[in-house]
Amino acid sequence: QVHLVESGGGLVQPGGSLRLSCAVSGTVFRINTMGWYRQAPGKQRELVATVTTGGSTNYADSVKGRFTISRDDAKNTVSVQMNNLKPEDTAVYYCVLKVLLQTYWGQGTQVTVSS
């Protein structure tokens, strides 16, 4: 059984920073893609950023230059450093693991950007 547990969400003022982390437990094939999606109220879930086992990254245009994704395969974790946060970044952020034909999701962590 694979489980993903996010941490690090919270309330931050515009221009502030947060770091989200996700720990993956269970047996996982070592070649995979890990990342983050988000869903704002009334909107569809959307890509934030992903990183492959080989280190290739993909970012949503809206977060390029502000967010940085990283992974630690020894610890089975993926993190995203979010800088210069904007009110439009407010959403529930979900950790995702894509391996072979399976996709696993975390429960989500709330990020609220407000003054």
Image (cartoon, grey):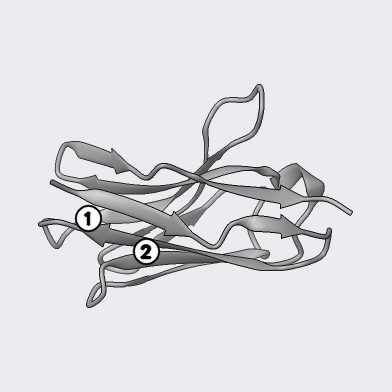
What amino acid type is highlighted by mark number 2?
A: Ser
**Which residue carries the number 1 mark?**
32
- On the image, the x and y values in percent for residue 47 come to 50, 42
Q: Nearer the viewer, residue 54 or 69?
A: 69
Marked residue nearer the N-terminal end (1 or 2): 1
Name the residue located 56 percent from the left edge and 25 percent from the top edge: 44
Mark 1 vs mark 2: in front: 1
Q: Residues within 10 Å of mark 2 (few under 14, many from 20)?
A: few
- On the image, the x and y values in percent for residue 81 come to 57, 68
- On the image, the x and y values in percent for residue 18 come to 64, 66
**Res 39 quadrant in image:** top right
What amino acid type is highlighted by mark number 1?
A: Asn
Q: Position of 89 compared to 101: left or right?
A: right
Give the secondary structure at mark 1: loop
Is residue 102 at all visible to an observer of this figure?
A: yes
Task: Specify the label residue 87 is tagged with.
Answer: none
Q: Position of 101 compared to 33: left or right?
A: left
Extreme-top residue of the structure: 42
Q: Position of 45 compared to 57: left or right?
A: right
**Res 25 quadrant in image:** bottom left
Q: Nearer the viewer, residue 8 or 52?
A: 8
Give the secondary structure at mark 2: loop
**Which residue carries the number 2 mark?**
56
Name the residue located 33 percent from the left edge and 67 percent from the top edge: 77
Name the residue located 82 percent from the left edge and 60 percent from the top edge: 13
Q: Residues within 10 Å of mark 1 (few under 14, many from 20)?
A: some
- Cα–Cα span, label 1 and label 2: 11 Å
Q: Is residue 92 above or below residue 50?
A: above
Is residue 61 at all visible to an observer of this figure?
A: no
